[in-house]
Image: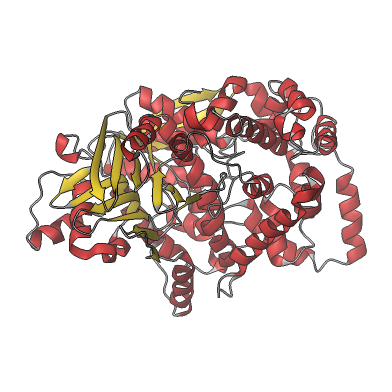
Amino acid sequence: MCGIAGTYRWPDGKIVTDRLTDTLAHRGPDGAGRYGHPVGDGEVQLGHRRLSIIDLSDTGAQPMVSDGLVLTYNGELYNAPELRAELAAAGVRFRGTSDTEVLLEAWRRWGTDCLPRLRGMFAFGIFDERTGELVLVRDQLGIKPLFLLRRGEGLVFASELKALGRATGGSLEVDHAALVASLLYYWVPDSRCAFREAEKLPPGSWLRCRPDGRVERGRFWNLKDVAAEGQERARAGERPDLAAIVEESTRKHLLSDVPVATFLSGGLDSSWLTALAARHQPGISAYTIGFRAEDARFEAMPDDLRYARQVAERFGVDLHEIEIAPNVLDLLPQMTYHLDEPIGDPAAINTFLICEAAREAGVKVMLSGMGADELFAGYRKHLANLLALRYQRVPGPLRRGVSAAVDRLPVATSRRGLRSVRFAKRFLSFADLPEETAFRRSYTMYDQNELLALIDPDLAGTVDDVVTEHADIYEDNELDDFVNRMCLADARMFLPGLNLAYTDRSSMAASTEVRVPYVDVEVVKAAFAVPGDRKIVGRQGKAALKEAATSILPREIVYRPKGLFSAPLRAWMSRDLAPLVREVVNDGELVRSGFLRRDALARMVAEDAAGQQDFSKHLWHVLTLEYWYRDATSGSGQSTRQTA
């Protein structure tokens, strides 16, 4: 895992690439390198920051140069041993043991045809000295990031958006459409970027730059096609062995020359991974979090710690418990800087603090249960949308009566949050809507009218565009299975746009690599071969995965109530952050610029304070957006700031 950067036919490419690479120092504190070569009337420059995981010697250093090919690479190939054996049998002689060298030689032998064969997470740039061509590539599911920017015939790329700001001297312009999208979702979709000129290379795709200025794009893997193939496999009666597939993926994700540990929340996904990892690496370490007792009570949070302890004891895991009681006033700007774009999920703080603690203990690699909920229908929204179909059969007058009664209920008292009321209000906000609209509304922050009331009226057309984009992506499939349609939409939007994004950026801020065994091409193929009626059975989400996990986990863990990898936002908002919220509403840059409307924000604050509505997540995201916007428009923030 590393940080990569580079320029192609870009003015002052050497100086700019050094700036890019310096900005990524936290991603790779173990080494740095740069390579340059003439290209036409310009040059290519490739930079690298190394986090040494496999082959800790100099033979794994990058950029790696070998017989006319040059590679700067961020990621891990879990099938590198198999590819190495195949290449060696064909006569390739390897200098070291790194997966970097395997990737370089696979490219030499097969070119872009090697890409569908890669099993792992990766983003890389590879340059051919003979042709002068640079190819950029991003992994199948968007686990690793790759940002790029083109001006004229020049291109600059990097693992982080803030690095591109440095390359352009802070001249990047905020894309207000991306900010509107971030308000809707509380993250920026992978199809958009917070700055106008910049873009994210789409998952499963490549981009080729030629010396004559031509740019070619291609796709080597398409999730929509994988889902369609899975549906055909299910129709043919195929039942994938999920227990065997997840175990194989977990075993492969343990490939490392340094210690590996796990996240262990006590929930199904992390518990299963930890148990499987302990089977292959006895005594493995795991990290779990808890919250201040008063915060957990106010938020009505489940006691996940006891389950984590139970798993650790049963499987001989060395458990490290971390209490999350951060100074959120200090952490908020720090996390906003590292997250690169306005991302309003406080789980990013948990990830950062866990990784920071692990790193201090000498751990560089962590396994996470990320992705299982999206692929196997484990979120409440999946079950809620199924229940909404039944609710729509209830007579209209009765539904209106229920809605009116629930609307009058408070979401919190002075001492305690009322979780069931929050869930009921959320459910009723979308239960009567058509499928795609209901799904969008079940996990986004606002409906269309609420969003229009919050922002500059001139952005009404942008709101339409953002909402239409969601509909287009959701409906772009041929699946006849409602549950798998939701899973596909999550895997294409929610997973790369939010969960994988904050996981990468938060962990790398602590110079730690996080691996995601559920977000593996073979696990994904198996997931879409599982029919929706095996993913949600009765009121049990993720049913097929739970059934498979009983091969090793006790039923008490498998079928426990779903845990939360979140944070006590209501407690933080009511105490630590209340003065900051008032400041942002009354005199924040977003309000002064006209992007957000003060009266709408003030109403949200008042209703939240009164306990009538839970706007804690909305207001947290407004704070993250405010801090990001201040940096982005300061003329220096994103471009020069290197410490939080």
Q: Is residue 60 above or below residue 319?
A: below
User: Which residue is outermost to the front?
Assistant: 41
Q: Is 68 situated left or right of 636 in this image?
A: left
Q: Position of residue 212 (x, y in %)?
A: 32, 60
Q: Position of residue 153 (x, y in %)?
A: 40, 54
Q: Position of residue 9 (x, y in %)?
A: 34, 48
Please indicate, yes or no, whether residue 395 appears anywhere in the rendered image. yes
Q: Position of residue 114 (x, y in %)?
A: 26, 63
Residue located 61% across and 23% down the image = 328
Foreground of the two, 247 or 368: 368
Residue located 59% across and 75% down the image = 480
Q: Is 474 situated left or right of 522 in this image?
A: right
Foreground of the two, 129 or 193: 129
Please indicate, yes or no, whether residue 516 appears anywhere in the rendered image. no
Q: Is 178 situated left or right of 151 in this image?
A: right
Q: Is 187 situated left or right of 119 in this image?
A: right
Q: Which quadrant holds the N terminus?
A: top left
Residue located 54% across and 49% down the image = 497
